[in-house]
Amino acid sequence: MTMTSAHPHPHRRGGRTAARAAALAGALVALLVLSGCVPSFLEPPTSESKPTGERVAADLEPYYGQVLTWEGCDGGFECATATAPLDWEAPGDGEIELALVRHRATGERIGSLLVNPGGPGGSGYDFVKDSLDYAVGQPLQQRFDIVGFDPRGVGRSSAVTCYEPADMDQFLFGIVPGERGSDEWIANAGQVKTDFGAACGENTGALLGEVDTKSAARDLDMLRAALGDEQLNYLGYSYGTFLGATYAGLFPEKVGRLVLDGAIDPAAQEEDVSREQAIGFESALRAYLADCLAGTDCPFSGSVDAAMDDISRLLASVDASPMRGSDGREVGADTLVTAIVYPLYSADSWPYLSEMLDAVMLGDADAALSFADGYYGRNADGTYNDNSTESFLAINCLDYAYQSDVAVMREKAAEIAAAAPVIGPYFGYGDLGCVTWPYASTAERTAIHAEGAAPIVVIGTTNDPATPYTWAVSLADQLDSGVLVTYEGEGHTAYNKSNDCVSGAVESYLIDGTVPSDGTTC
């Protein structure tokens, strides 16, 4: 979701993305396994046309009017590829491809339900195809064609490409020389980010400047039309809430039934996101420790405050003197923070966090590397499953504004560290990742009202570490038709993973159009 310190820590929708670390497999069995879409020769391709009465500008007609050709995929899914303009402001300047996968409604069909798992950079294609029951409940599968898609820049769609695996290892796990926050450290960290951005620009080309969320939202409207739907029905998680809210702001008259779960505040600036996420993960870490200390086999003793101090000292220790794994990679504070926050996305994973921290305190760097590898989608052979980290950075660099004043960076970093004393010191200096990006951001983070849109359901979890509850409150207040549903609990996002109250409210709304009461608490 945001970038921290020397290296990117995409604190995104980890609870809905692939569970790649072996240590977490038992706790996150419903998550993605990232398999491909293999055409089946048992089913003939099918095609569908746009809805009747769709009116668009002449230069957009080839996109809105395109006929999608669906081919059978393994597992009973169908796959298709759509085309979109590279630049929606200049439709004649080139095209990109968007990958889609669909699971047809098993009962009486209402229409299509498009799903985004978050990120930015998460693959909606893999999310739907590889973990359908986790993405949506059975009632929605019965009534909707469930459609996953990779947004522009992501996965199987026309994708951002930056580094080969060995260079990606160095980018993600390399140790930046100098004391954190010093002139030397800032210069070295800035050079790391500059080199990465230059590689992205060279290997991706003009697409790198067109992967912003506004462009993705325009793709979403085109996909709606190509699927044959008069209005958009949509389920977005985490970053997917920002994509959905952006869509509603651009096309309020096309809003059908939108659910935005684990909401992002569209008006939040980059420094606000970093600070609030640091606070959120710190709160989740405290909740984990309270649970750990109340049970058995906890690697800590004493009070929660004492255990937090232990973790703070551990992070400071590896920041000053990194540990080395069996494969030669080093574990500094940035990597260890990633390893800690990964299982904080879900309370079900807390026992695995205990095992990892216990191992690290005994000198086992491999335990932290396995969690960080799971977070970044790195395989045991050093390859990476997808481009989620690259696309995450590319999209965020266009979606937020950044500045180069080192004094301001230090001031913001100090504020984050004060707000979250254990995790916060490693969440600062996010501007370094994008201030020298090949394509400068022109984004303005402002409130989205979507005047005239049908009711939009916003879901917030009270102790969500990645998308703090205050963001859901803010988004629901901003939207003229926003309706807030609160889940009182732990973890990132709530639908289909919390309780029947949340799932029932979402499914009644999407299936029957029954809008939950604003302020519903589950």
Image: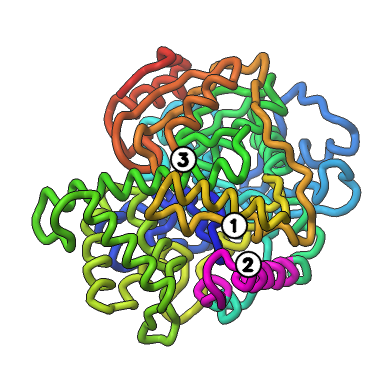
**Span colored in magenta:** 171-200
> At which x and y percent is residue 500?
28, 28
Colour convention: rainbow
The amino acid pointed to by label 3 is Thr
Q: Residue tagged by mark 3?
A: 467
Q: CA distance from mark 1 to mark 2?
A: 8 Å
**Tag 1–tag 2 contact (CB < 8 Å):** yes
Label 3 residue SS: loop
The residue at 55%/53% (across/down) is 413
Q: Is residue 133 visible?
A: no
In the depicted structure, whether residue 109 falls above or below residue 514? below
Pointer 3 or 1: first along the chain: 1
Magenta segment: does it hold 61? no
Front: mark 3 or 1: 1
In the depicted structure, whether residue 361 falls above or below residue 231? below
> At which x and y percent is residue 8?
55, 61
6 with respect to 211 (left or right): left
The residue at 61%/34% (across/down) is 266
59 with respect to 307 (left or right): right
> At which x and y percent is residue 436?
75, 61
| Disc ID at residue 353 | none
Q: Residue tagged by mark 1?
A: 429
- Residue farthest along the left direction in this orientation: 296
Q: Quadrant of residue 133?
A: top left
Please tell me how crowded label 2 is: few (under 14), some (14-19), or many (20+) other residues with Cα within 10 Å: many
**Tag 2–tag 3 contact (CB < 8 Å):** no
Q: Residue tagged by mark 2?
A: 186
